[in-house]
Image (cartoon, coloured by chain):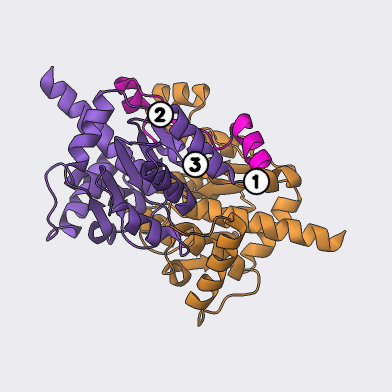
Chain colours: A orange, B purple
Amino acid sequence: MDFIKDPHKIEEKSMEIIERKIRGFTFTPRQKPIVKRVVHATGDSSYAAMLAFSPQAVEAALSALLANEPIYCDVEMVRTGLSRLGLQQLGIKPVCLIHDLEIKKEAKKRGITRAMAAMEHAVRECPDGGIFVIGNAPTSLFHLLRAVDEGRAKPALVIGVPVGFVGAAEAKELLTAYSLPWITVRGEKGGSPVAAAIVNALVNLALESKEARA
Amino acid sequence: MDFIKDPHKIEEKSMEIIERKIRGFTFTPRQKPIVKRVVHATGDSSYAAMLAFSPQAVEAALSALLANEPIYCDVEMVRTGLSRLGLQQLGIKPVCLIHDLEIKKEAKKRGITRAMAAMEHAVRECPDGGIFVIGNAPTSLFHLLRAVDEGRAKPALVIGVPVGFVGAAEAKELLTAYSLPWITVRGEKGGSPVAAAIVNALVNLALESKEARA
């Protein structure tokens, strides 16, 4: 039972393997580490063919992170997956409202889902800017896009990677029609590790660019 | 922008679609809801071909859950993904030690990873029985199996679904050689949503069998 024990060595070796697996895809130098981190988190190199970025999405993301824009996550699993240390260095504390008692009460009172009530609250709190990360429910993404249509939200970045066979592919396809900065995964796959991997890769890039400037 | 808003309806429709997608695979009536929940959580029906169960794994799992065996999760993302309500009804509070201050100190002192220190602690706390859920690091699974070899652990169930290109497939292949009850996913894929989905499906089955008995 001989195995590599050092997590840094495992990650290094893993990234080498992934580098070979995604050869042939054309990503910009800043998109590539994001793609690699998603493949690393899922063990699934088919994500290289499904990840999609709006023009300048990564640049918009880095500006938003360096400007300490708030990060709203649709579910706790996304928030738990985010790099604490990296976000701390950027001075950002990611928010997830789904288990908030006030949100639960409001959802019950209005007969809507907690995911919807949480998204409405996030949008009220941050009508201009903000990084919205949706790793679970297509309804959260639909709800956010409706708020954009109605002028109640103007996200600095939407990471929209909900998962599943009902509505997820449609919600993500819809997102790609918007002119705001977005990152998504076409099709049915996605989920919280994908969402967290995208944010974590962006956080690394932001810290690198911060260092380079200093 | 017309979409299904009711999460129960979305899940129902999703499960119908998944039922069709996994047609042709032979699972026992109790394995099938587990497979469906994993496919639901990942949007990836290829899991139907990769999920593997030791003989009587589900029966062992239900006995363990109904006997309030402790649940140890390797990472917080797994624990966060578990059904709070279901586990509460079974009187089980899932544990994850990776961010525990004592574990951090011990890992640093001994020059081992936090994942290893956490697994050692779990095994010391629960040398006989316990449900061990590994959704992230192959090293945690290797470490647990070494403890089994040395007679320091005798899990009631191992859910071993670490993800990645370095060691994960090997660790899971090794698990399938053990005569203890296990559930795994062959190959490189896996991760915390897969681990959480398996536990949540088992919790549902346990609650159903508890109700049927009452």
Q: Marks 3 and 2: which is nearer the front?
A: 2
Residue that lies at the very extreme toward the top in this rendered image: B214
Q: Name which of mark 2 and mark 1 comes first in the sequence.
A: 1
Q: Residue at x 69, y 45 (%)?
A: A85
- Identify residue for label 1: B111
B59 and B8: which is toward the camera: B59
Q: Are marks 2 and 1 on the same chain?
A: yes
Examine the image and state in which quarter residue A174 appears: bottom left
Q: Report the chain holding disc 1.
A: B
Q: Residue at x 88, y 58 (%)?
A: A214
Horizontal relation, residue B3 to residue A6: left or right: left
Q: Secondary structure at mark 1?
A: loop
Q: Where does residue A51 sit, x and y in percent of width and height? A: 48, 66
Q: Is residue A212 above or below residue A28?
A: above
**Quarter of the image with the C terminus of chain B in it:** top left
Horizontal relation, residue A69 to residue B36: left or right: right
- Identify residue for label 2: B126
Residue that lies at the very extreme toward the front in this rendered image: B150
Q: Report the chain holding disc 2.
A: B
Q: Amino acid at mark 3?
A: Val
Examine the image and state in which quarter residue B172 appears: bottom left
Q: Is residue A103 above or below residue A27?
A: above
Q: Where does residue B141 sit, x and y in percent of width and height? A: 42, 48
Residue B93: numbered disc: none
- Identify residue for label 3: B75
Q: Amino acid at mark 1?
A: Gly
